[in-house]
Image (cartoon, rainbow, N blue to C red):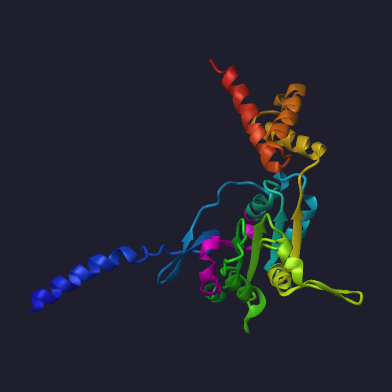
Amino acid sequence: MDEELARRLLHLMERVEPWLPPTPVEIDWGRDIAALWQRHALGGRLVPVPPRDTLGLAALLGIERQKRALVDNTRAFLRGHPANHALLWGARGSGKSSLVRALLNDLAAEGLRLVQVDRHDLAGLPSLVEGLRRERRRFVVYCDDLSFEGHDDAYKALKSVLDGTLTGPPENVLLYATSNRRHLLPESMSDNDATRLVGDELHHGDAVEEKISLSDRFGLWLGFHPFDQAVYLETCRHWVAHLGTPADWTAEARAEAIRFATLRGARSGRVAWQFACQWVGTRRLQASP
């Protein structure tokens, strides 16, 4: 009988084991400055990750106003002063994610720690935030490329953590998000069907109010827009010199940068970086034996 029970328990463990989370990696916030939050069936875990690169704030061109506002907000938070959750929204490739990355690289020495959460793991956000409440460090919880579809209820967890619970987020946690959508949720013409004018006041319908209510919980909105040609070319010049030498930025390079952006249908920091990689890489390949 004991052998049969042991056999059945062993069989049960073999079936359950694939569902168990991996052995957690110990995080030392004195050493680790960033981590990923990974949700699983039994909750979630933090996985330390090294910085992706050494990109600093000084390397980001064309977004001076946005840099200054986010740095000031983050430094106020790090020093225990009032600060806002931040929503960075706007054109693709315009520097939203790069700004958060550079912010961590430059302010980690001042105490900033960052935890990135994938949009699909937002259901575990309340659990993550409660765990960080017990830490003595100050954290930015970051969600990149955040947006929701009309049938997606994951935004309710985010809304609750931002402002909708009795306790609210702990004083040592801020939420930063990037998105191509200003209101995070899709907007359609039908949303305005219930909007009405009462006297001189515009009253939105429930659908519009629901969508606006989420983005309204971010106290700091930073808009990112396509570069004009002068800023785009200056950014190209910067990255060409960074990846190669200042001598690589020539009249020919300038003309090719304009052509590159025209073919891509966009002028942005990302396009400038991609052009610099192509231009410098091709020149070095041609110069090699």
Q: Is residue 40 visible?
A: yes
Q: Against 131, is 286 above or below?
A: above
Q: Can residue 75 be seen in this view?
A: no
- Closer-to-camera residue (147/72): 147
Q: Does the magenta stretch include residue 128?
A: yes
Q: Against 25, is 54 above or below?
A: above
**Residue drawn at (65%, 79%) of the image:** 164
Q: Does the magenta stretch include residue 45?
A: no
Where residue 162 sits in the image (x, y, percent)? 65, 73
Q: Which quadrant holds the N terminus?
A: bottom left
Q: Against 226, is 3 above or below?
A: below
Left or right of residue 182, residue 286 in this image = left
Where residue 173 sits in the image (x, y, percent)? 62, 70
Left or right of residue 125, residue 22 in this image = left
**Residue drawn at (70%, 67%) of the image:** 215
Of helix, strand and loop, which mostly describes the magenta segment? Answer: helix
Q: Which residue is situated farthest in the right direction here?
A: 200
- Closer-to-camera residue (251/243): 251
Q: Answer with the quarter of the image where residue 239 lies.
A: top right
**Residue drawn at (62%, 81%) of the image:** 165
- Closer-to-camera residue (130/9): 9
Q: Answer with the quarter of the image where residue 219 lies.
A: bottom right
- Part of the protein shown in magenta: 104-129
Where residue 101 sits in the image (x, y, percent)? 63, 53
Q: Answer with the quarter of the image where residue 272 lies.
A: top right
**Residue drawn at (76%, 67%) of the image:** 192
Where residue 220 sits in the image (x, y, percent)? 75, 65
